[in-house]
Amino acid sequence: MFTITEEDIQTVLRDYGITGSCVSFCELQRYHYEEDDLSSKQVRLIIRVDTDEGEALVIRFKNEEDAPIETIEAQSRFAALLYASGIETPKTYLSDGRYARPYRMNGYDVTVTVERFVAGELQIVDAETAEETGSLLAEMHNVAEQADYHVESAVLFDPLSRNDLFGFEEFTAHKDKLSAIDSALYQRIVEAHDRLAAHLKPFEQEARYAVQGDISDCNLYRTREGRLGVFDFNRCGDNNLFFDAVMQAVFEARLMDYPEDLAGRQEEVILPAFLKGYQQKRPFTAEQKAAFPYFYSLVSAFWLADLKWNENSLLNALKSEDSESARRWMEEIFRRECYLLPMPV
């Protein structure tokens, strides 16, 4: 397992021009790759370091197959661009003109980055925070587009490829079993999907720009002055900005924690608030507003939590050979495909 010492940390601080000395450090996040493979040399370790000069820093150590040093450097430069443009995000530190630096530590090759630690992490989202988040995302999109900035890396929320929110391929992977339950209904679902997906075609050839890529998942914080900020550019990459806006909005409306008074109605409150905030800083075009209902229906119909992750998912119904439950899921998927929600802004 990858380990570090105070001496290792002191070396990093010196290389990044930080004059203070480490007085304490603690782990914020560690991926245990060795649990699946004892010989693995993959690393993701994030630590907080406190110095004798009163600074609190975050040092990230990485060695992951999908994150070469060039990608980490580009992600860090995007974070620095946002910081320089007035977006609230942690300051990143340079070492010999670069943000990402390679090290050989305790038998591991790792890429290191250093940034200022920020407190005030948000986990509960209300309507006001959702509107602020939409506004923040729009400002980030404006910076990326104006600077023509790009990061060649996959993102979590690209509807044109595998993503973390929805997946038509997760449905069609079980074609034989689903067709055996109701072949006509299966075919109607597929045909409806194709009609919905056709409304995204005009956006496929649009320019893509760098996005933070994971703005909603506990990566938000509020400063003492009340400003909303964002950190963690681990999933930063290029995406169509309209796609990113809609999928980030749906994520925040469905997969965060919410005040008790929003229980059962969080999406009807959070989604329009997020899109309202976005629209104020980056107005949606007529074409985007027209495409939104079809895009939203795609996401909802093939929502991965319902298809495979939840205990009562479609996949679990198929595994248990519960044909009646599987049929109900097929009917629900088709219902969602037919429900067209106008853009709520």
Image (cartoon, helix red, strand yellow):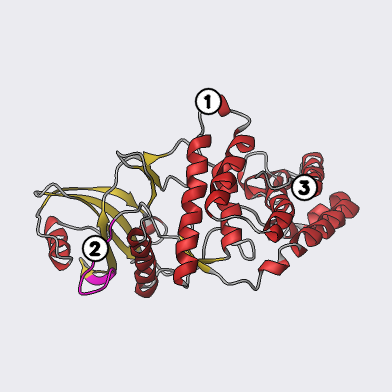
Does residue 321 appear to the left or right of 310 in the view shown?
right
- As helix, strand or loop, the secondary structure at mark 2 comes to loop
Q: Are marks 3 and 1 in contact (CB under 8 Å)?
A: no
Residue positioned most to the top: 261
The residue singled out by tag 1 in the image is 260
What is the CA distance from the residue labelled 3 to the residue labelled 1? 28 Å
- Res. 96 in view: yes
The residue singled out by tag 2 in the image is 93
> Residues in magenta?
91-103
102 drawn magenta: yes
Above or below for 299 versus 38: above
Does residue 208 appear to the left or right of 167 in the view shown?
left
The residue singled out by tag 3 in the image is 340
Relative depth, front residue between 147 and 319: 147
Relative depth, front residue between 128 and 40: 128
Relative depth, front residue between 118 and 108: 118
The kind of residue tagged 2 is Tyr
The nearer-to-camera label among 3 and 1 is 3
3 drawn magenta: no
Residue positioned most to the right: 184
- Res. 150 in view: no
Give the image location of residue 216, x and y in percent.
Answer: 48, 47
Q: Residue at x 28, y 68 (%)?
A: 99
Q: Quadrant of residue 295?
A: bottom right
N-term-proximal mark, 3 vs 2: 2
The kind of residue tagged 3 is Leu
- As helix, strand or loop, the secondary structure at mark 3 comes to loop
What is the CA distance from the residue labelled 2 to the residue labelled 1? 40 Å
Crowdedness of circle 3 by 10 Å Cα count: few (<14), some, many (20+)?
A: some
Give the image location of residue 108, x and y in percent.
Answer: 26, 68
